[in-house]
Image: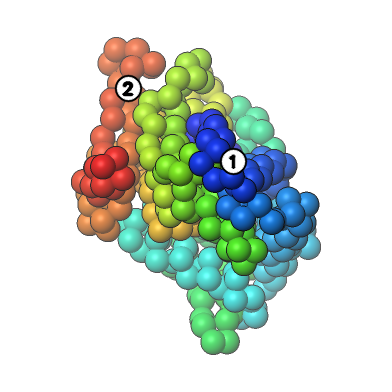
Amino acid sequence: MPRILVVIAAFVLSGCWSQTIRIELQGETMGTTFSIVAIDRTGAMDPAAVRTAVELTLKEVNAAMSNWDPESEVSRFNDSGTHPVAISPELAEIMQTANAVHVASQGAFDVTLGPLIALWGFGHDTPDGRVPDLEDIKQAQSIIGQSDVLKLTRMPDTLQKSDERVSVHLAAIAKGYGIDRIAGTLQDLGLRDYMVEIGGDLVTAGLNDRDTFWRIGIERPDPTDKRVEDVIPISDQGMATSGDYRNYFEQDGVRYAHILDATTGHPITHTTASVTVLADSAMLADAWATALLALGAERGLPVAEKNNLAVFFIVRDTRILETSFSTIASSRFEEVLARERE
């Protein structure tokens, strides 16, 4: 589920640190792009060594979490039967987080939606513009429901399906996990100031090369208008945005977005166009952005307040024009911005 919804603000080398080197890396991964800006305060870091370490980390993440690689760990699990399957600590960590968000979001976040995602044409292929038959939707719904069809045990780490047709689809959390893994790699190399972004989701640490917080722009969810809705300063936080306006198809004048409601088996129908979440990790921000977009602002704001989440909703006003928007922020989001703008 591509979410290229965050605009990374440009940063200018200030010269405040005579030995400061700005390391920039770009590339492709997970069906999208990545961008890394790391600030080497000592001037001793080899950028080539940083790239090598980052690429190795991405290779490890994809080998475990990619639904597009038939040899990945999650793909092998999806091909397994109903017996308990030993899984890596990394996959167990993701599943434990996924289970926690699933429960806290009242089931809105669900890694077992793969059959529905494929049925609606929002998987690896582009949407085919066809609304599935109701009977096919019901059959897909019979093998989804994370808390009902999956069982995770820890120490030893195993994962078990209740039906061999059940599958785990990690697109809404693995990207954030990969960002956090890269951040860990940079920390291991001795870097303390950086911004790591994959497909618009990101994590920041320390300060930029102007010795200030990283400034991140939230894009207005309108493909015809590239303006930035707001720019926020953040440090030592993960950030993710999920929106409904890039991956969709239309049939008979009805717009079908890629975010699915597990309870109905259909794409969301509310007017919330995008959700931005700030969290302690990119993985948490990634999962919660998907969950809260599935819920929409009306149902999602109480969930955000209950879980003390920093969330920014952009809502489409269809009574006027599709390009008219309003914004809603959780109290935690307002607190974070007030503190970091001081």
Above-or-below relation of 171 to 90: above
Residue 325, numbered circle = 2
Left or right position of 317 against 2? left
Q: Earlier in the sequence, mark 1 or mark 2?
A: 1
The residue positioned farthest toward the front in the image shown: 18
Residue 290 makes an appearance in the image: no
Q: Identity of the amino acid at label 2?
A: Phe
Q: Position of residue 262 (x, y in %)?
A: 43, 50
Q: Residue at x 69, y 56 (%)?
A: 44
Callout 1: SS = loop
What residue sits right under mark 1 in the picture? 199
Look at label 1 and name its amino acid. Gly
Give the residue drawn at x 51%, y 41%: 16
Residue under the point 59% across and 41% down: 199
Residue 234 image offset from top left, x and y in percent = 40, 45
Say whether residue 95 is visible. Answer: yes
| Badge 2 element | strand
Of residues 208 and 79, the one nearer the viewer is 208
